Image: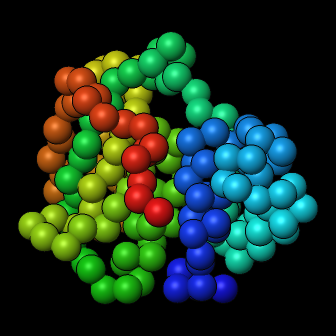
Amino acid sequence: MNDSQLDAFDRKIMAALHRDGRMSMTELASTVGLSKTPCQLRVKKLRDSGFIQGFRAILDLGKLGLDHIAFVEVTLSDTREAALQAFNSAVSEVSEIEECHMIAGAFDYLLKVRTVDIKAYRAVLGEVISNLPHVSNSSTHVSMEAVKDDGQNAAF
């Protein structure tokens, strides 16, 4: 199944679950205008085909003391495939790196790093990020406030 095979019901199902992944199947079916069994079959098809990858709890990381966010521009000394793979693999092992995006532009990667404070961030930068494979340069941008950070307005 690919994107072109999704119909309006599939898109409504994904939008509804994106807003509230805990809604009951009965409530979901009613929301999208289907009966329960066809809705269940569509959700199963969407999961089996990878459109729905899972369900999770969204935590308030600020309440857990993890409200320091820094965005780090990373430039690599080598951008051949083996170097990129080594960097990608190493990044996936660093719990403080919340997101990692390969960028087309003046630098190679943009990292979203979450720590308890600037001191902890400085340690992660100096001891971890700077020592990732092929890192030659980094530049940090500290977030002062998250104006929008919910991922809830995705268009289906």
Q: Is residue 33 shown above or below 47?
A: above
Q: Is residue 141 shown above or below 144?
A: below
Whether residue 126 can be seen here: no
- Compared across the picture, whether 34 is left or right of 124 comes to right
Q: Residue at the location (59% across, 58% down)? A: 12
Which residue is situated farthest in the right direction here? Answer: 37
**Residue 61 % position (x, y):** 50, 24
Which residue is situated farthest in the left direction here? Answer: 106
Q: Is residue 86 shown above or below 146?
A: below
| Labels in figure, total | 0
**Residue 126 % position (x, y):** 30, 39
Q: Quadrant of the N terminus?
A: bottom right
Q: Residue at the location (24% across, 24% down)? A: 145
99 or 77: nearer the viewer = 99
- Compared across the picture, whether 23 is left or right of 12 comes to right
Q: Give the colour scheme of this rendering.
A: rainbow
81 or 6: nearer the viewer = 6
Whether residue 75 can be seen here: yes
Residue 21, quarter of the rendered image = top right
**Residue 128 % position (x, y):** 39, 45
Q: Is residue 126 shown above or below 9?
A: above
Q: Residue at the location (77% across, 73% down)? A: 45
**Residue 54 % position (x, y):** 70, 55
- Compared across the picture, whether 59 is left or right of 41 comes to left
135 or 61: nearer the viewer = 61
Q: Residue at the location (67% across, 47% down)? A: 31
- Compared across the picture, whether 40 is left or right of 51 comes to right
